[in-house]
Image (cartoon, rainbow, N blue to C red):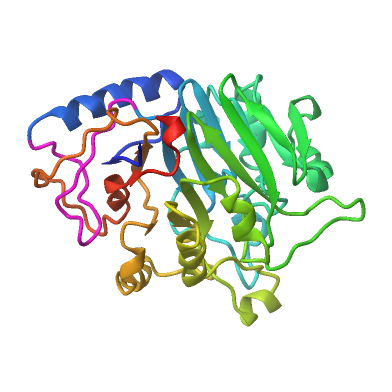
Amino acid sequence: MKQAIAIFPESRVPRTRQESVSFSAASAAVSASPGAPGLMPALPGLSGLRGRADAPDLKAWWLGQAGFLFESGDLRILVDPYLSDSLAQKYRGKKYPHTRMSPPPVLPGELFDIDFVLVSHSHSDHLDPGTLPLIAANNPSCRFLVPESCLATALERGIPARMIDAVNAGDRQALGAGGRLSVIPSAHERLEKDVKGHFLHLGYILDLAGVVAYHSGDCVPYPGLAENLAGFGPDLAFLPVNGRDAQRTSNGIVGNFTLEEAVDLVLSLPACFGLGHHFGMFDFNTIDPAEGKRYLASRPEAQGRFALVEPGLMLAFSAQPGLSQLSQAQPGPGAALSGATISGLARAKLDRHPDRG
């Protein structure tokens, strides 16, 4: 049996490994206490369910846009962090000024103990010249996994060559002592390769302590994607849902999954949960989260299978029964937060991988 478990609100992004350990201990103490103030209620239809995450196998924090911090054991992994205002500086005075809709949850110079940074493609909100050099400077042992197709861009944007591992679709790599990474193509409106045959856009499948998480980078549905993913058996799919349209495309703003397409992909994968992101950063390239939640509520089959990520949350997942204790207790004082959608995932027990516990 496998469980995806609890959500903790008001969780600041841990700057160091030790800060994360301290926060997890405090969260476990809170979740074990009667009433458990601060735990979020579940999705509509699962409002009585809460989770406890005293020993999660995978923790995640949304950094905005497509950026995430993942932790598993001692591993700390960043994916596509955009934590600067480099695009606002680049496009100041232009038609689309790329002004942030909200500040970054952490500054790039505040992150330490980072083991890996995964970059999906060359766009600056994924390969950020205002973020990655600072992370490199403060984390000298970190490895930056960068698409072979944008290696030159990564060097130009300040990542030291000695810290880069160039990757392409089909590659597999160990992440620390127990983690594994697989690389697959992504289609940022279409599948593209450079003149050497390297894909321009990549997605990453992380297997961390038995939790399999797919981060697509920027992507739209393409033939064979669902079948490829099914072979990895993902438990979680982190998908961009800002959509696409002719106006944005004609202005060079390449699009992603619509929310409907992202939900359809997740529902095609047995026992996979979807987490929609890549919104709320730039006003010309986002969705309205309230409208997104109304859409999800209109699809009963998506209940407990898909949610939109929200800032200020720690998502905790376990691959082992018994590490999370789920109950039907009512939410305690202060637990009901506006728009709390993600914690519906806490109710799932996945039977697909009995060999993992």
Task: Identify which residue, 85 or 286, lies in the foreground.
Answer: 286
Above/below status of 70 relative to 259: above
| Residue 176: quarter of image | top right
Residue, x 29% and y 40% (percent of image)? 6
Q: Is residue 129 visible from the viewing direction of this image?
A: no
Q: Quadrant of the C terminus?
A: top left
Residue, x 48% and y 61% (percent of image)? 279
Magenta: main secondary structure: loop
Q: Residue furthest front?
A: 354
Image position, residue 329 (x, y; %): 10, 43
Image position, residue 155 (x, y; %): 80, 38
Residue, x 68% and y 68% (percent of image)? 189
Q: Quadrant of the N terminus?
A: top left
Q: Residue furthest bottom?
A: 246
Q: Is residue 197 visible from the viewing direction of this image?
A: yes
Per the image, is 19 magenta? no
Image position, residue 188 (x, y; %): 68, 63
